[in-house]
Amino acid sequence: MPEHRAPKDGLILAINAGSSSLKISLYRRTDGHATSPGHGAVELLLTSSITNISSPPASFTFQLASHKEGREAKKESVDGIKDHAAAFSYFLDHLKNESRIDRESIVHVCHRVVHGGDYYEPVIIDSESYHHIENLSDLAPLHNGAALSVMKSAIESLPKASSIAYFDTTFHRSIPLHIASYAINPEVAHKRGLKKYGFHGLSYAYILGAVGHYLQKDTSSLNLIIMHLGSGASLCAIRNGQSLDTSMGLTPVSGLPGATRSGLVDPSLIFHYTNRAGRITHDPHQAVDVRVTQAEQILNLESGWKALTGTSDFGEVVKNMQEHLQHQGATQGRDVVDWQSEAKWKLAFDLFVDRIVGFVGSYYVRLGGKVDALVFSGGIGEKSVELREAVVRNAECLGFQLDEAANAKVGEQEGVAVNAGKRADTSRVLVCRTDEQLEMAKECALEEKFWQ
């Protein structure tokens, strides 16, 4: 393993492994003054992404930060990329040719890891920490495995660089015991680590800093309700700059539904779902031995709005819902949904909004009605005008009000945090463009023990 303390002019590579994607950003440390969250600690040199890894051909992009506005990033379709390790190798092969940056100049590689168990701070990847993360893979089956494969590839390809794991669970270590605990046998819970961990922590940490910068307030004084809405979706209640509660729990499957995740369901549902009788029954002869892997498969990969509509693209859900409502009218008054009709699009949209609003209301009460801002983030939260409108409309009784014109133009506004509400004092509605890679690189740059 390389020396952890690296020369200050060394580069930081930040890697975010999704279930079928790999996002990569390269930074250099800087001593400049902060003009936006994260800046002042690091300077972005380039970004790259590889998508559709699980359904080839993969799509590869490479963009230098120095490219002038309007200049196209390199984009290409690649047949040979079928896993995350191959995607990372493909990036490294292009690094020098496209940027003239030698891989030897990379001294730290930051890896986003969804589930860190009881790791409460970033750790250098060695044999012990690697196997600990590996043992947690069953709790985050869509992500931890992908991150591990990239770690292994990074250690082999960049032997002089330190690989450092940054955990989504770390941000939520402040959640009080009575909120993090489940009402089960405490001895079993403690032995097996069965508690609420929470996820999307790197995103929430970045958003907290960005909103503090935008509002010109110390983060330790902020009360926020943040929504990270994407293919994986969650909410977080932040009190005095710390996580008070979050919608995901022991695993990312709990809480809000996602593209392929069920979200919160009755714990008994999975047993009835797999029952041979095809209906609710307590006949032991109809029982099925449901294994953890089978339950994870159903609740993580065979649910969500893809199960409801056939697509994992929420933009398609919104588009088809609008077209259906325009041409056929809303399907109100039906007791039974016709699954062959187009009503499925509205069902998926309304269900997602309902679950979000339920958590918003709960967290508003948890924060005693003292909320500095309601913040939308994540791919859907940042891009879906319609979803923001529906959520805020349902939360108006709490004092949140949307500025429809501002909401419609969020995509045209510059800056990390953008106002989308009518209120300029309290109960603001903001949209924040999150950046988990920048958060990791910033934390790495500011950690003295990693530098000479």
Image (tube, rainbow, N blue to C red):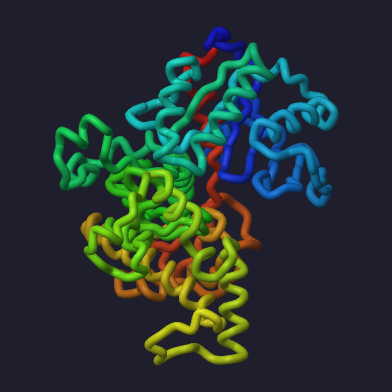
Residue 324 visible within the image: yes
Q: Nearer the viewer, residue 412 or 385?
A: 385
Vertical order, 263 against 332 (above or below): above
Vertical order, 11 against 333 (above or below): above
Residue 83 in percent (x, y) is at 66, 37
Residue 34 visible within the image: no
Residue beneath the point at 25% across and 67% down: 281
Residue beneath the point at 30% across and 74% down: 397
User: Quadrant of residue 282 in the image?
Assistant: bottom left
User: Quadrant of residue 341 in the image?
Assistant: bottom right
Residue beneath the point at 54% across and 29% down: 148
> Which quadrant holds the N terminus?
top right
Q: Nearer the viewer, residue 32 or 434?
A: 434
Residue 98 in percent (x, y) is at 83, 32
User: Quadrant of residue 219 in the image?
Assistant: top left
Vertical order, 338 against 449 (above or below): below
Horizontal side of 419 relative to 158 (left or right) equals: left
Horizontal side of 243 relative to 200 (left or right) equals: left
Horizontal side of 114 relative to 368 (left or right) equals: right
